[in-house]
Amino acid sequence: MPIPFFSPRDLSFHLYEVLQVDQLTRFTHFQDHDRSSFDMVLGAATQISENLLRPLLTVMDRDEPQLVDGKIRVHPDMRAIIRRFGDDGWINAPFTYEEGGQQLPATVMTAATFIFGAANYSSSVFPFLTTGAANLIRSFGSPELIDRFTPNMYAGRWQGTMALTEPDAGSSLSDITTSAELVDNESGTYRIRGQKIYISAGDHDACDNVIHLMLAKIKGGPGIATPAGAKGISLFVVPQKRPTETGGLVDNDVLTAGVYHKMGYKGAPIAHLMVGSNEGAVGYLLGEPHQGLRYMFQMMNEARIGVGMNAVSIGTAAYYASLAYARERPQGRLISEKDPGKPQTPIIRHADVKRMLLFQKAVLEGSLGLLLQCSQYADVVHAAEGDERDRAVLLLDLLTPVAKSYPSEIGCLTTSAAVQILGGAGYTTDFPVEQFYREARIHPIHEGTTGIHGLDLLGRKVTLQGGRAVQYWAEEVQKTMAEASQHNELQPMVDELGKALGLLDTVTRHLLGLMPTNTEAALSDATLYLEMFGIINIGWQWLRQATVATQKLPGALSEADRNFYNGKLMTARYFMEYELIKICSLAKRLQSPDRVTVAMQSEWF
């Protein structure tokens, strides 16, 4: 019997019992949907995952992409899979009916991508990279650019990418050197020259063309001034092959110089591109000059929720693999049963194995809740108006760095726990958890490193509109606490979360107080502040889940449902007892006057 890679029951619990996602249909934009249409989408995602993606999990890891005669070769089945995503409408599902989309809520779309990623992360990234790129073109492009590029992208014939990183710039985008020289102002065409590295799906043979959304700086000319740094960056559509008026494709001076060979996530290629080495690649200005970074951040913020969910997807697949193994693997006996004549016990009965399973379950199901919550805020931003929309905007801005970074960092530890449960078997390629362990490691790096998101949270997000974002967030947490307080058995969890909120407030005030006189000291441990904030958010999510479970348990339930809700309550207890308490040491560190990392000199290493 195949090992499950996610729990449909748990996903349904998050969507319908906690978030009540079907209430989104009160908005005009989503009014044509209902629970049955949402279930149909999730059922289709499960079917594709089981039949097309999961069977390729191991082979895509073993037979990784290769650069052959200037073209990156990927698994031959990927062409049909990408076209299937196009034919079934997945690539543009969130877009409007007028654009051929389904106006599907982001919450449901995010849940579907969770299923795809848990089945086979490498194969799942191709279509949704295209979604992000196409969304930028439809948001900021002229009607001509939209008509020229998006139909084939939606159909899965053309790949979309986000081309930011350069060899000497990395995350410091203000230092990029790729240039754009104006050719025709009326058509907005430029000659693009430079190079880009680590471009996901930047070239492959499973599509007919690759459309790069590329950052570059416009060259100054007579009467033209390019602002310095990030303010001088513009965004261009740079196709690998340029569409002609007759419907053909011609090379556009975008060459693949290499393919990087990664420790995990091997089935999707990461390309090194040389752009404009000869006559210069033709690029089309997207939107206004010098607004590229602002435009690109739309795609990046969407992608950051996606990265967090990808981390949860991989971790979830590892959790269910280790859970299945723990149920079946007999080894040793309980400490209270020392008779060697008795049969060995399944390792799932050992307390330390249960601890490692609870760790995975607590972190992953809590993170899944937070990411779906953020997606629901995105839906409200899109569909609501007035105060409701404004509140969702601030909550989403505040929580995006947390939702991206906490699951990504902790996912490295949950997949490690999965390997540990399998013991020596987990360290071999004969079992899947070693692959999940390798694949998890990219997410703290993807779409901004954890350090960058720590600076973003503490340096910008907590002071949004004079701290209004944090105020709204605290109100949401307190609302959950008030609801949970109606159940006496949950009061200890409420008390612990209340103490955590108070400690976070104290630490935040302390660090913000340092900002005016010693910004470097205030931000030196921003990553630890991000970790503390993340832990509290997952505690919030578990209190929400525990409240729902408590409300359900007195009812007439099947044995499976009773086990499910009891599992939720026990895992919530675990998180409060084992994870939430970690903020005490983080708070002590963050309030200490000893700034070791600032004082340390590079020569002393």
Image (cartoon, rainbow, N blue to C red):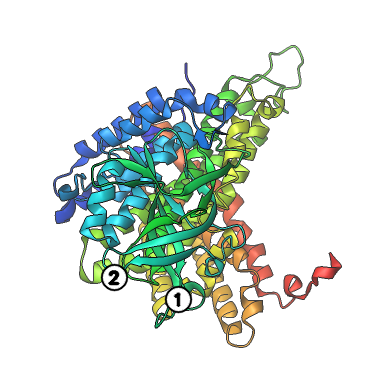
Say what amino acid the circle numbered 2 marks.
Asp
* Three-letter amino acid code of the residue under disc 1: Gly
Q: Judge whether residue 191 can be spotted in this image.
A: yes
Residue occupying the point 73% across, 28% down: 335
Q: Residue furthest front?
A: 279
Which residue occupies 57% across, 46% down? 442
- Vertical placement of 445 versus 560: above or below? below
Q: Residue 122 got which mark?
A: none
Q: Residue furthest top?
A: 341
Q: Earlier in the sequence, mark 2 or mark 1?
A: 1
Say few, some or many: other residues with alpha carbon within 10 Å of mark 2 (under 14 / 14 to 19 / 20 or more): some
Whether 490 is drawn above or below 205: the answer is below
Mark 1 highlights which residue? 220
Query: In this view of the protein, which residue sits in the foreground, 451 or 544?
Result: 451
Locate residue 250: give its quadrant.
top left
Q: Position of residue 379 (x, y in %)?
A: 28, 56
The structure residue drawn at horizontal position 84% and vertical position 69%, both measured from the top left corner, is 603
Badge 2 element: helix
- In this figure, which residue is indicated by the disc labeled 2? 390
